[in-house]
Amino acid sequence: RSRQLWAELARAGQDGPFTPCGGLLIGPENGPLAGGALRAAREHGVPVRTFTATALRFRFPRHTGVPAHHIGVWEPSAGLVRPRRAVRAAVALAERAGARV
């Protein structure tokens, strides 16, 4: 749902606030970061790819020091949000709807 909302804000402004670039989280499978992301992705039907530590070191050579008990969770649809662009687009939407900002 959030991707739909970011797209709506992008239509309101000239520069979209969301840039898809994928996201990689690394940590223990039962930990809060990678493990939590994996559980949330499964719960919400978000496609992710998981990597063992060995596969992670091969696929992402920068991460050569990943401990053997860690996993990588790659979410191709993840991205970054530029807050200033998001605020400008939200203000533009509000003004078009008649708000005085």
Image: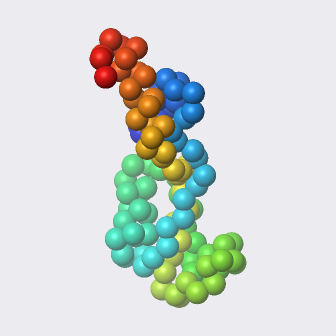
Query: What scheme was used to colour the molecule?
Result: rainbow
Can you say which quadrant of the picture contains the N terminus?
A: top left
Q: Is residue 81 visible?
A: yes
Q: Is residue 36 above or below residue 62?
A: above
Seen as rendered, the residue at the extreme top is 98
Can you say which quadrant of the picture contains the C terminus?
A: top left
Please give the count of numbered marks on the rendered protein. Answer: 0
Q: Position of residue 93 (x, y in %)?
A: 41, 21
Q: Nearer the viewer, residue 88 or 75?
A: 88
Q: Position of residue 65 (x, y in %)?
A: 58, 87
Q: Which residue is painted at 54% across and 64% down in the image?
A: 24
The image quadrant of residue 88 is top left
Q: Is residue 39 above or below residue 91?
A: below
Q: Nearer the viewer, residue 57 or 39?
A: 57
Q: Position of residue 29 (x, y in %)?
A: 42, 75
Q: Which residue is painted at 55% across and 35% down in the image?
A: 16
Q: Position of residue 25 (x, y in %)?
A: 49, 67
Q: Is residue 31 left or right of residue 74?
A: left
Q: Which residue is painted at 38% across and 57% down in the image?
A: 40
Seen as rendered, the residue at the extreme front is 101
Q: Which residue is painted at 48% across and 46% down in the image?
A: 81
Q: Is residue 5 visible?
A: no
